[in-house]
Image (cartoon, rainbow, N blue to C red):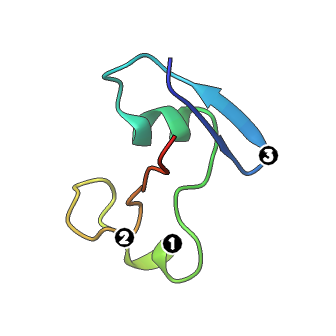
Amino acid sequence: MPKVTAQGKTVTWEVGANLRQVLRQNKIDLYNGQAKSINCRGSGSCGTCALTRSPP
């Protein structure tokens, strides 16, 4: 299972799950600064909640 730690919380989810939804369900804020007001609300067009993956 994939795992992410953000805002002091560690969350795991099933492979193939929507990470944005998983983070929201666990009350992890997706945005900071001005991105809180200029985001696209999950339509995938603004990039403010884009994630990067560190190499293992």
The answer to whether residue 27 is above or below residue 44 is above
Q: Residue 47 at x, y = what percent?
A: 31, 68
Looking at the rendered image, the disc whose residue lies closer to the viewer, 3 or 1, is 3
Q: Looking at the picture, which amino acid does disc 2 mark?
A: Asn
Q: Which is in the foreground here, disc 3 or disc 2?
A: 3
Q: Secondary structure at mark 2?
A: loop
Q: Quadrant of residue 40?
A: bottom left
- Residue at the image point whose x is 63% and y is 29% from the top: 11
Q: What residue do we see at 37% from left, 60% from top?
A: 50
Q: Position of residue 53 (x, y in %)?
A: 44, 50
Tell which circle, 3 or 2, labels the residue nearer the N-terminal end: 3
Image x and y of residue 5, in percent: 67, 41
Q: CA distance from mark 3 to mark 2?
A: 23 Å
Q: Which mark is residue 18?
A: none
- The amino acid type, in three-letter code, at marker 1 is Lys
| Tags 1 and 2 touching, CB below 8 Å | yes
Residue 8's mark? 3
State the separation of the CA atoms marked 3 and 1. Answer: 20 Å
Which residue lies at the image location 35% right of the left edge and 32% below the top edge? 18
Element on which disc 1 rests? helix
Q: Identify the disc placed on residue 39.
A: 2
3 or 11: nearer the eye? 3
Q: For the view shown, which residue lies furthest in the front direction?
A: 56
- Dot 1 corresponds to which residue? 36
Cα–Cα span, label 1 and label 2 = 6 Å
